[in-house]
Image (spheres, rainbow, N blue to C red):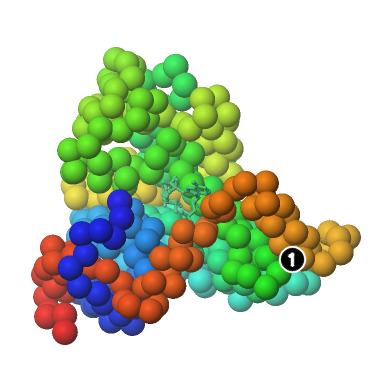
Amino acid sequence: MTHTEATSRISFEKLVTVLEQIFAKHGVSSVNARVLAVNCATCERDGSLSHGIFRIPGYVGSLKSGWVDGCAVPVVREFGPAFIRVDAMNGFAQPALKAAMPRVIEMAMTSGAAVVAIKDSHHFSALWPDLEPLAKAGFVALSMVSGLACVAPPGGTVPVFGTNPIAFATPVAGRLPLIFDYATSTMSNGDLQLAARAGEHVEIGTGVDKEGKLTTEPNVILLGGAMLPFGGHKGAATALMVEIMASALTGGQFSSEVDISAHPGAETSKTGQVLIVIDPNRGGNFKFADRVKTLTQSLRIAGQSRLPSDRRYATRALSDKSGIPISAEQLRELTSLASTDIP
Ligand code: NDP
């Protein structure tokens, strides 16, 4: 999905304010509302549209149905010099991570690394906003999240995995961090829903119908079929790792164990998230960020014209200059959810 249907533009600060109002109106504490609003506006600003404004009705559905606690106060506990557990208390993952962040940074500086295991959390967004501040502070960071089961293993028809994203961030000397962040399914579920809404076909290999036959019809995949991991058995193994790290390790539910059936309208998954933060200066290397810069330059010289996060940073620069594009329909939806006029 692109910003092409935009009819007007909104500033980042204004969008955050409107989103805060929506979250607060639907029972989210002010501290959590701020974190979620900044996260969502940040996605929209950078053109991560499958996890920006598009997700707001899903957040609201989960809140209204009582599936997620918008006022949850996360409990942060330490288990050794480099391990933090966070119980999100059935709240959103981003406020849980934010509560742990000061200690995560201290630990990574003193111990050289920090592992954060978050459980009982709802993650409904892109992962890169969780990592970018860490890479800007000089750390290498890796995160994984499990989800709602909608991805079958190769050869199967029963969804076992969520779209299980994985993200990695590293400092690059003199530049914004290099970050990649992707679903281990062929595409994110949000993008598949957007394709269904637009009446578009998807590539063969994206998913199967309920008999396990490949199909290009998004609705056949979404309603009774299953998505597939990217790259056959290699993507499936990566999705399996995410499930183990984000759910088994943290004490969270597996994607296939999440049952939202008693909460009509709920859309968020209640699983876990793992975050690994490393101080690269402990690695015995010489000027780590410079070495990464050299490597990225080699890739460009070798012919790779686009590196991960290039597109996002370019979209961000445009949004910062001219405002975030927003369509008339989105504006109407936000206004109605916030029950207020957006100036
Ligand atoms: P994309 O395929 O859109 O992008 C994956 C990554 O690859 C991005 O870092 C992107 O950089 C980069 N990239 C894309 N195309 C190219 C290219 N041609 N050359 C080089 N790099 C490229 O990601 P997905 O659709 O798989 O996932 C989208 C988002 O959905 C992610 O942020 C993910 O975290 C989120 N998600 C969240 C879930 C949750 O439960 N919370 C579940 C599943 C997904 P760039 O950003 O600059 O385009």
| Amino acid under disc 1 | Ala
Q: Name the spot of residue 60 as percent of width and height, x first.
A: 22, 61
Q: Pick whichever, 184 or 108, lies toward us.
A: 184
Residue 257 visible: no
Q: Name the spot of residue 325 as percent of width and height, x first.
A: 27, 69
The residue depicted at 64 percent of the width and 53 percent of the height is 300
Residue 128 visible: yes
Q: Name the spot of residue 158 as percent of width and height, x first.
A: 37, 23
* Mark 1, other Cα within 10 Å: few <14 / some 14–19 / many ≥20: many
Q: Pick whichever, 298 or 36, lies toward us.
A: 298
Q: Name the spot of residue 154 as percent of width and height, x first.
A: 47, 21
Q: Circle 1 is placed at which residue position? A: 289
Q: Pick whichever, 92 or 51, lies toward us.
A: 51
Q: Quarter of the image holding residue 11? A: bottom left
Q: Quarter of the image holding residue 201? A: top left
Q: Left or right? Give the position of 278 relative to 287.
A: left
Q: Quarter of the image holding residue 150? A: top left
The residue depicted at 30 percent of the width and 51 percent of the height is 1
280 is higher (above) or lower (below) than 101: above
